Image (cartoon, helix red, strand yellow):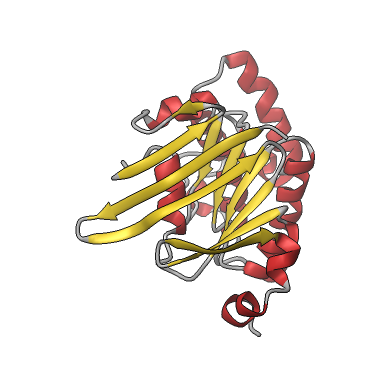
Amino acid sequence: MAQILSVRDLHVSYGAIKAVRGISFDINEGEIVSLIGANGAGKSTTLDTIAGLNRPEGGSISFKGEDIVGTKPHKIVERGLALCPEGRRVFTQMSVGENLAMGGYTRTDEENREQVERVYARFPRLRERVAQSAGTLSGGEQQMLAMGRALMSRPDLLMLDEPSMGLAPILVEEIFDIIKELNEQGTTILLVEQNASMALSIAHRGYVLETGTISKTGTGAELLHDDDVRKAYLGG
């Protein structure tokens, strides 16, 4: 498989706080790769930095063979990398349809007409609520909208930050089924998720972050059965 993302010796700080301390990892086309770890481990910081929202102190980020450090976030989206952020961050005063339109700003009108139909096919509830204010949606519906908005740019690599946060168990299963289906249809996924068991169960490979460093790596199955991982993140 061809490599789509390569992160090397990445360092990110917030003032005196070193959030990411020299991590390196790769993602191949067609994979689901999960980053797991406790709160404050550096997971979201890593995704935000890849997406161009943070400027690293050191290290390199290569996407589809090109260095993207210092590239504007909207240019990174144009290259085929999209972030669905933690906390959904939908535009609450705008309608569902308007939120989706915002996600397709890098594409042509014709491409957006085609893609929004794909999004509605994936998330039928969004079609039902197309004119509804995003702020009035349930948590699960807002997560679907955030994912749909990210998909409007037709990403080759979709980064998902805590997609199950605050959702009921039945909705968590639905979201993870959708993630698997997106991957099976060709989208590469980088997944940050507190629900380590669910994340590793669908991941081809995973990385464990602890205080800004990678402490373990392996296949999803290997990490699921690792004693240290089980004790720390899987409830024994």
Q: Quadrant of residue 216?
A: bottom right
Q: Is residue 109 above or below residue 71?
A: above
Q: Position of residue 224 (x, y in %)?
A: 71, 70
Residue extending furthest left?
16
Image mark count: 0
Q: Position of residue 91 (x, y in %)?
A: 44, 43
Q: Is residue 45 above or below residue 118?
A: below
Residue found at x 44% / y 51%:
46
Quarter of the picture containing the C terminus is: bottom right
Tell me, yes or no, if residue 91 can be seen here.
Answer: no
Residue found at x 57% / y 79%:
232
Residue found at x 72% / y 31%:
118
Q: Quadrant of residue 13?
A: bottom left
Q: Is residue 76 above or below residue 91?
A: above
Q: Position of residue 103 (x, y in %)?
A: 52, 32
* Left or right: residue 234 compared with residue 22: right
Residue found at x 33% / y 51%:
12
Q: Is residue 65 above or below residue 141?
A: above
* Left or right: residue 36 compared with residue 124: left
Q: Position of residue 202 (x, y in %)?
A: 74, 57
Quarter of the picture containing the N terminus is: top right
85 or 203, nearer to the observer: 203
145 or 84, nearer to the observer: 84
* Left or right: residue 73 compared with residue 37: left
* Left or right: residue 21 compared with residue 178: left
Tell me, yes or no, if residue 137 can be seen here.
Answer: yes
